[in-house]
Image (cartoon, grey):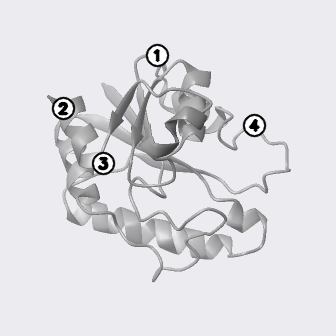
């Protein structure tokens, strides 16, 4: 069995910008080819997990029920396109909560590995930020940075960590993983 983790904002859907949140169904917009990429990974036998910080809930910017509605729509559209997300893991805590699940801490990935009984060694985590790379490194998994969200090659000299691989988008990463 093959496993892959995806961040949400900036990987699956349009990155809302630093200090902004996807606060409604209307603001959730899939990135080009994201559904196609997830469908490809699904067809090739990957179990796909989403691991994402959604602190807007903990900060009271939007409600848990709004996040649940956005997630339900995301999963439905992915399934309609032939993809399947095994499970979605969110950290909804405020950044000062001191939890073990807020990325770059590895709690979300470790929870999935415990729940579905697999090792994180050799698993890929695809994210759009160096925070995702740090999360991956904390678990011994392999990191893929996609350039459709927060971090860009232009700021590379300021990165705290170097990803294992860099691709322009999720579809390019998915094609690499399935080739």
Q: Earlier in the sequence, mark 4 or mark 2?
A: 4
Give the residue displayed 23% in from the left and 42% down from the top.
172
Whether residues under marks 3 and 1 lie with C-beta atoms below 8 angstroms apart, the answer is no
Q: CA distance from mark 3 to mark 4?
A: 28 Å
Q: Earlier in the sequence, mark 3 or mark 2?
A: 3
Relative side of 29 to 173, left or right: right
The CA distance from mark 3 to mark 2 is: 15 Å
Distance from label 2 to label 1 (Cα)? 18 Å
- Characterize the local packing of mark 2: few (<14), some (14-19) or many (20 or more) Cα atoms within 10 angstroms: few
| Front label number (3 vs 2) | 3
Residue 107 falls left or right of residue 122: right
The answer to whether residue 138 is above or below residue 65 is above
Q: Give the residue drawn at x 33%, y 67%.
A: 76
Q: Secondary structure at mark 3?
A: loop
Work out whether residue 23 or residue 14 is closer to the camera in this orientation and state it: 14
Which of the numbered marks, if any, corresponds to residue 169?
3
Image marks 4 and 2: residues in contact by CB distance under 8 Å: no
Residue position marked by numbered label 2 in the rendering:
178
The foreground one among 62 and 157 is 157
Mark 4 nearby-residue class (10 Å; few <14, some 14–19, many ≥20): some
Picture disc at residue 100: 4
Q: CA distance from mark 3 to mark 1?
A: 23 Å
- Per the image, the residue denoted by label 1 is 121
Where is 162 relative to 173, above or below?
above
Q: Residues within 10 Å of mark 3 (few under 14, many from 20)?
A: many
Query: Which is nearer the N-term, disc 3 or disc 1?
Result: 1
Nearest to viewer (mark 3 / mark 4): 3
Q: Which mark is residue 20?
A: none
């Amino acid at each position: 069995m093959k496993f892959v983790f995806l961040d949400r904002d900036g990987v699956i859907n349009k990155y809302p910008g630093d200090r902004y949140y996807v606060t409604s169904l209307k603001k959730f917009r899939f990135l080009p080819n994201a559904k196609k990429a997830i469908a490809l990974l699904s067809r090739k036998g990957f179990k796909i997990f989403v691991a994402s910080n959604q602190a807007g809930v903990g900060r009271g910017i939007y409600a848990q029920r709004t996040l649940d509605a956005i997630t339900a729509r995301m999963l439905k559209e992915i399934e309609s396109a032939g993809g399947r997300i095994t499970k979605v893991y969110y950290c909804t805590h405020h950044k000062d909560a001191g939890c073990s699940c807020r990325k770059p801490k590895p709690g979300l990935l470790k929870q999935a590995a415990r729940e579905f009984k697999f090792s994180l060694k050799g698993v890929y985590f695809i994210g759009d930020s160096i925070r995702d790379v740090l999360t991956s490194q904390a678990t011994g998994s392999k990191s893929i940075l996609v350039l459709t969200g927060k971090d860009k090659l232009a700021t590379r000299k300021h990165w705290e960590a170097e990803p294992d691989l860099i691709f322009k988008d999720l579809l390019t990463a998915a094609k690499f993983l399935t080739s």
